[in-house]
Amino acid sequence: MDLLTPELGLFFWTLIAFLAVFFILRKYAWGPILKSLNERETGIAEAIASADKVKAEMALMQNESEKLMQQAREERATIIREARQEHDNIINKAKEETKAVADRMLTEARQQIEQQKMAALTEVKNEIGKLSLEVAEKVLRKELATPESQDAYAKQLVAEIKLN
Amino acid sequence: MVLKRLFYLLAVVFVLTGATNFAFAQHEGNEHHEAAEHGHSETKEEKGFNASKVIFSHIADSHYWHLFDWNGHPVSLSLPVIIYHPENGLEMFSASEFHHGEHPYKGKNGNEYRLESGMKEKIVSADGAAIKDFSLTKNVVSMLISVILLLVIMTNVAKKYKKNGVMSAPTGFQNALEPVITFIRDEVAKPNLGNKYMRFMPLLLTIFFFIWINNLLGLLPGGANFTGNIAVTACLALVTFVVMMAVSNKHYWGHLLNPPGVPMGIKFLLVPIEIMSMFIKPIALCIRLFANMMAGHIVILSVISMIFIFGAISSVAGWGFAPVSLAFSMFMFLLELLVAAIQAFIFANLAAVFIGQAIEEPHGDHAH
């Protein structure tokens, strides 16, 4: 039983030493160490949280940029479509206008040709009339050069009148 | 790197322990032989090896720090003796004055003190007064060494935290301590103490490291069996009990003295049991650490002693048994290394559990 009876001296020194160690270490070791560990852990937790936030923001931004891209793509498509339409319109309009101009020009040309033709024809007719008059004059002059022919002719004329 | 170094250190310690235990026991054996032969010994000792005396002289506290024996003479440090005599006051002298218990020391007023060595060394006053022995015994000195080690190691590590900044990776000894500290925090303090754990972290850390480093020092060859001494464990248990009482709240006392939802008749039975359990908790703390550490030391020493018990029968048997005994004692030593940490952890954990019970807040439901 000797071993089970605590010695007062050892108890006393242990108590003093333990309490001294406790108070010294609490102030100079455990305090700073626990504080640092805590700070580090909260720091890491914050870093992770902020990283997550950044990631979320990145995702959001990516989403947005994706949306913007989509929008841009759509806009491009509409612009191209519209441009194509415009292009077609312009071509069509140009074609129509050209056609109209051409038609007008054709009609004008036709009219002019007609006019020219008419003028030419009139001139030709006049010329022909003049020429035929000259020819007739010449022919008459030749036919009626002799008195017999004049007489014959007069006879013929009389004959004709008789017939009427 | 650090782990590797630690491993080598431990390996060296094992070998040395084996060797010195061997040497110790052998010399003790020789000493008794010689004592018997020369007729110096006053007690009637059996010729041969007295294992229980060897073992108990190793695990008991002493006023000398026995290092080794040289040519049959013990080489030991004589430690200071401090005695409080109710009439003569404090007396201080070196234990060498006793000449290993052979001479009394003449103190103030001609009063003589003698060193009696039974199972435990004891200083008695010749006038029969009830003296108090506050000597710096082997255990006290060993504890002071551990205290210095603790203070140096921990304050250095704390300095590193301050110097290297909070967010840098730990270096050197910080690496070894940080997991232990976070282990105590996450596995001992947080589960048992709830959100007030930070308040008790310094106490738990001090208890854990104080016990652990003393357990380890006790395992060194020639080391003192400090944590295997009931005065030490009683002191630590008392500190825990005082803290437990100091922080206990109304809820705890309410449940203890007037357990809700219990019939009157049973209350008469239950309340005394609860009050008893309040005192049994620190006593359990005290006994379990003491018994575990002392048992470990006794087992290692017993296994080593077997060599000399066999050696006393015949030297062939002694040499023949030595390898078996050494192997077994090394196994026990490894086990004790583990036990050193486990017991420190258990003490800290139980302290946390008991304090946690004392500060528990009512939950609304009565889960008792």
Image: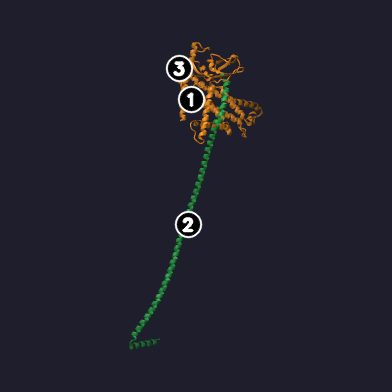
Q: Secondary structure at mark 1?
A: helix
Whether B132 is drawn above or below B250: the answer is above
The reply to whether callout 1 and callout 3 are in contact (CB within 8 Å) is no
Query: For the residues marked 2 and 1, what is the alpha-carbon distance in whole angstroms?
Result: 87 Å
Q: Sort mark 1 into few (<14), some (14-19) or many (20+) by Cα contacts within 10 Å.
A: some
- The answer for which chain carries disc 1 is B
Residue A82: give its label: 2
What chain is tagged by disc 2?
Answer: A
Would residue A46 be seen by someone viewing this image from the given angle? Answer: yes
Query: Which amino acid is tagged 3?
Result: Gly
Q: Secondary structure at mark 3?
A: helix
* Chain letter for the green colouring in the rendering: A
Relative to the observer, which residue lies in front, A40 or A143?
A40
Point out which mark residue A73 bears: none
Q: Residue at x 64, y 27 (%)?
A: B271
Quarter of the figure with the N terminus of chain B = top left
Q: Which residue is mark 3?
A: B318
Of the residues shown, which amino acid type is indicated by label 2? Glu
Q: Residue furthest front?
A: B109
- Residue A81: percent from the left, percent from the top? 47, 56
Q: In the depicted view, which residue is nearer to us: B244 or A109?
A: B244
- With B362 as the anchor, is A110 left or right in this view? left
Q: Colour of chain B?
A: orange
Q: Which residue is mark 1?
A: B334
* Secondary structure under the numbered disc 2 in the rendered image: helix
Q: Is residue B47 visible?
A: no
For marks 1 and 3, the one nearer the N-term is 3
- Marks 1, 3 in one chain: yes
